[in-house]
Amino acid sequence: MSLEGQFNNNKRIAITRKLIENARQRINLSLELEKELDNLELQRRMRQLELESKVLKQQEKGLA
């Protein structure tokens, strides 16, 4: 293989490695974002339950 061919091959390998690393980072980021969204949904649901509990307590007081 000529020097130019070797250079081009090495360049392709370096680019491929960089693309693979970028893909891994995006996958990791996607997983982290999914976990964050799950946590936010849980927090939202907990707040909703707290508000519902307060409303029920107020209604209970109103009936007493």
Image (cartoon, rainbow, N blue to C red):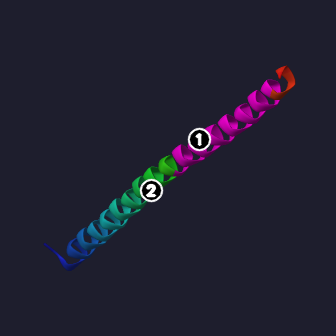
Asked if 12 appears above or below 63 in the picture, the reply is below
Which quadrant: the N terminus? bottom left
In which image quadrant can residue 2 be found?
bottom left
Q: Earlier in the sequence, mark 1 or mark 2?
A: 2
Q: CA distance from mark 1 to mark 2?
A: 22 Å
Residue 64, percent from left and from top: 83, 23
Please state the extent of the stretch shown in magenta in the rendering.
Answer: 36-60
Closer-to-camera residue (51/56): 56
Q: On the image, numbered disc 1 is attached to which residue?
A: 41
For label 1, count other residues whose C-alpha is less than 10 Å away and answer few (under 14), some (14-19) or many (20+): few
Element on which disc 1 rests: helix
Please name which of the two marks, 1 or 2, marks the residue nearer to the observer.
1
Q: Residue at x 44, y 56 (%)?
A: 26
Q: Secondary structure at mark 2?
A: helix
Name the residue at 35% across, 66% down. Answer: 15
Q: Main secondary structure of the magenta part?
A: helix
Residue 64, labelled with which disc? none
Residue 5 sits above or below residue 54 on the image = below
Q: Position of residue 53 (x, y in %)?
A: 70, 33
From the viewer's perspective, is 57 left or right of 5? right
Viewer-nearest residue: 46 or 39: 46
Q: Residue sitting at 69 percent across and 36 percent down?
A: 48
Q: Circle 2 sits on which residue?
A: 26
Above/below status of 13 relative to 35: below
